[in-house]
Amino acid sequence: MFERKDLEQLEKFNFSDAYVVSLFLNVSPQERKKQAYLSKFKNLVKTLPEDIQDACKEDINKIEAFLQSERESFKKSVVIYSCSPKNLWVRYDLNVELKEDMIVDRSPYTTPLFDLLDNYQKYGVLLVDKRTARVFLVFLGEIEEYGIVEHEDVPGKHKKGGWFALAEKRYERHIDYHVKMHLKDVIEKFDSFLKDKNIRRLIVAGPDEAISELMNILDEEIKQKIVGITNIEKHASKEEVLEKILPIIEGYEHSKEEETVSELITRSLKNDNAVMGIDDVLKYLRDKRVMKLIIAKDYRVEGFICKNCGFATTQNVECCMECESCVMKSYNLLEKATEMAIEQAALVEVVKEEKNRRKLLEYGGIGAFLRF
Ligand SMILES: [Zn+2]
């Protein structure tokens, strides 16, 4: 897992006297059959000019050796930054597929990773009981544990019987007090964790009793971020936690997707700051009015792009309708649209769930919410 500050650190590498190789390669188990990913890597190398290939031969060999020897540890994709003369070697294993690419330049190419940070949600998980609390972060299908809060001074509930009722009651109150203090401390720590990591979606887990005590003292602001509640055993391994959490996240994201697609359709039919269809979307992208781009996964549209001003259209034109320069054929205008959206800091959301995807395709496969 990587964070914004890791990427900012990487950005600082700028070698005027050496090249950095940036590689984005999908290496899911499917790709690993017959080592398909290795031939894809070799093809990417071939796309580089020969003098560049020579200049970073050491890095290319190092990456190839790595791809052959480390495949057992791969996830869905791997990102590598390598600059042997300067001892730079950074590797990220991701649980999502990426647009495959290999860039050789004076500095690491980090845009695709910044895009992932911008377009995927982080989920905070709080696993709480009456004495302890564990905090996890789930991002891009991976989980990391960020710490544990333990209040060992919470007195244990003693066995019933052999104690008269009044003392029992006082003792219960004593426990309640400690539990409340523990939970208050947990909430405080968790809240600063959420702010620090810029997390806006939460899942609360634990035994029912601890969850309901927690909900009683939780701020409305935090409560609104909760997208799911579940029972998880307090000593669960992080893999077990992830296994419980992923279906909740998926369910939540599907329902969000459904909401987004319906809102897009309703609003664009009412001309209420939303549009659908590639030509309209491109038009508003040119005017820099797009707030959020919504795209059906794997959707493609052919068209033409102006070599001079970047004007793009699905219409069969020979010259640009804006500047009359030459146009070139594009096999996927959606890529152009995504690129423009990212350039102007608009959000891009890809609709993946099949039912939602088909609904969006009926209405043109792409749409946008507008700024004004
Ligand atoms: Zn033009």
Image: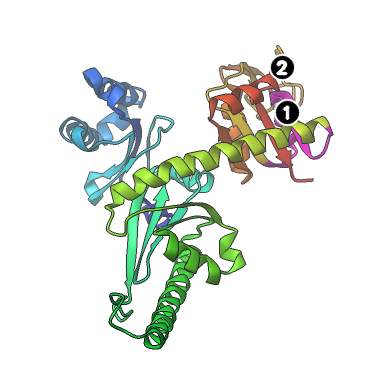
Rendered position, 14 above or below 332: below
Q: Which mark is residue 319?
A: 2
Rendered position, 221 above or below 111: below
Q: Which mark is residue 276?
A: 1
Dot 1 falls on a residue whose secondary structure is: strand
Q: How is the image coloured?
A: rainbow
**In this picture, residue 268 sits left or right of residue 362:** right
* Along the line of sight, the residue nearer the viewer: 211 or 318: 211
Q: Residue furthest right?
A: 270
Q: Is residue 140 visible?
A: no
* Along the line of sight, the residue nearer the viewer: 21 or 236: 236
Q: Position of residue 21 (x, y in %)?
A: 32, 39
Q: Position of residue 42 (x, y in %)?
A: 28, 23
Residue under the image location 53 percent in, 30 percent down: 352
Rendered position, 219 above or below 21: below
Q: In the rendered structure, does residue 284 fall within the stretch colored magenta?
A: yes
Residue under the image location 22 percent in, 45 percent down: 84
